[in-house]
Image (cartoon, helix red, strand yellow):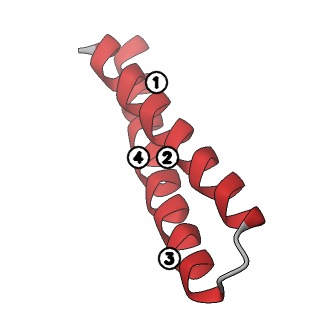
Amino acid sequence: MKAVKNLQYFWHNTKSHYYTVIAEDCLDKNLRKQLVEKADSHRLEAIQCRPKTQDLTC
């Protein structure tokens, strides 16, 4: 179970960074807004996965 939570954290963290980097170079404001929203969504998912991972290690 711990490995799954770590993998979910890694996945959402990576996707958040991925969308953030793409949004920085995007010239279309509407597309940039969508990419930032996706990045924020994945960042929040990563935050939710991280405490669960820490609880499992105790």
Report the amino acid beneath label 2: Ile
Q: Left or right? Give the position of 6 relative to 15.
A: left
The quadrant of the rendering that contains the C terminus is top left
Q: Which residue is mark 4?
A: 48
Distance, label 3 to label 1, CA atoms, is 31 Å
What is the residue that sits farthest to the left in this orientation?
Answer: 1
Q: Quadrant of the N terminus?
A: top left
Q: Separation of disc 4 and disc 2 at Cα?
A: 4 Å
Residue receiving disc 2 = 47
Question: Sequence order check: which comes first, mark 3 or mark 1?
Answer: 3
Front-most of residues 47 and 23: 23
Residue holding disc 1: 54
Tags 4 and 2 touching, CB below 8 Å: yes
Q: Residue at x 47, y 64 (%)?
A: 38
The residue wearing badge 3 is: 34
The amino acid marked with disc number 1 is Gln
Between the C-alphas of marks 1 and 4, the distance is 11 Å
- Secondary element type, mark 2: helix
Q: Nearer the viewer, mark 2 or mark 1?
A: 2
- Which residue: 55% across, 37% down? 14
